Amino acid sequence: MQSERFLIAQISDTHVRADDGGAAAKAMARAIAQAADYAVDLILLTGDLVNDARADEYAVLAAALQHPPAPIYLMPGNHDDRAQLRAHFPLARYLPMEGPLSYTIEDYPLRIVMLDQTVPGAVHGEITSAQADWLDQTLAAAPDRPTIVALHHPPFATHDLLFDKIGLHNGAAFAAVIARHPQVARVICGHHHRFAVGQAAHAPVVIAPSTSWAYGLALHDGQPIAPKTQEQPGWVLHAWTASGGLASHMIGL
């Protein structure tokens, strides 16, 4: 970190494949190259890292992430497999050896809590009582440190007819935990393949777009569900200072 400013690249929903001629991996690489141009301090990949949770896809992903310009931290989305992630990233010692891949990043001025609320074999996410307890205890351990909480599924209603059905179940439990911890300055997530902003208790929530493709909205009956649009794929740059807090910018690819 070159100054008091702390920069995070949030890259989400990369959907890396082994059968697309490298298109998704190349889009992710463009995002990482842009992050390097901004001299980010770390890179967070917030889920749906690959498309079909296949071993050959994780091999492509691992090869594409061999020489990152900043430390990279991974978390799963509903298209991912925890065991495959562990197997293909053996040096990612921050990943728990069993169970959900939830952990904290403690080595920076901004604390980051990565919450794995995916449901194996399902598209939606869920906040179980065990996950809510883990999050509550984790946040309680450092009440004076400004914190970002990252998860894959948006914890608020986006009003999209599909994505709210396959979004985060029991989001009220998540918001209740966040409400008890005023040090949470931002919640970040993905899943929706479009940039959007919402709220969880006092904390603004930022949904990062996908690097691979954008989805439009279906707000009313009869509108196409999850239409792929010409909107720009991209990622989000989060900039933090102790005096000014967080600013979040979408960066198009």
Image: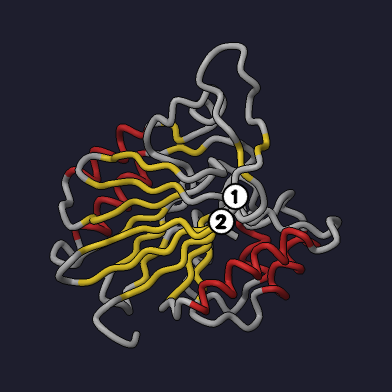
**Res. 232 mark:** 1
Crowd band around label 2 with a 10 angstrom C-alpha radius: few (<14), some (14–19), many (20+): many
Q: Is residue 222 above or below residue 135?
A: above
Q: Residue at x 47, y 42 (%)?
A: 153
Image quadrant occupied by the C terminus: bottom right
Q: Residue at x 60, y 57 (%)?
A: 82
Crowd band around label 1 with a 10 angstrom C-alpha radius: few (<14), some (14–19), many (20+): some
**Res. 234 mark:** 2
**Res. 54 mark:** none
Image quadrant occupied by the N terminus: bottom left
Of badges 2 and 1, the one in the foreground is 1
The residue nearer to you, when weighing 185 against 104, is 185
Residue contact between numbered discs 2 and 1, judged by CB atoms under 8 Å: yes
Residue lying farthest top? Answer: 221
Colouring: secondary structure
The residue nearer to you, when weighing 252 against 135, is 252
Q: Residue at x 56, y 56 (%)?
A: 234
Q: Residue at x 64, y 69 (%)?
A: 30
Q: Secondary structure at mark 2?
A: strand
Amino acid at pointer 1: Gln
Q: Secondary structure at mark 1?
A: loop
- Image location (x, y in percent) of residue 120: 60, 43
- Image location (x, y in percent) of residue 164: 48, 28
Count the labels in the image. 2
Alpha-carbon span between mark 2 and mark 1: 6 Å
Amino acid at pointer 2: Gly
- Image location (x, y in percent) of residue 68: 58, 80
The residue nearer to you, when weighing 28 against 249, is 249
Residue 244 figure quarter = bottom left
Q: Is residue 78 above or below residue 14?
A: above
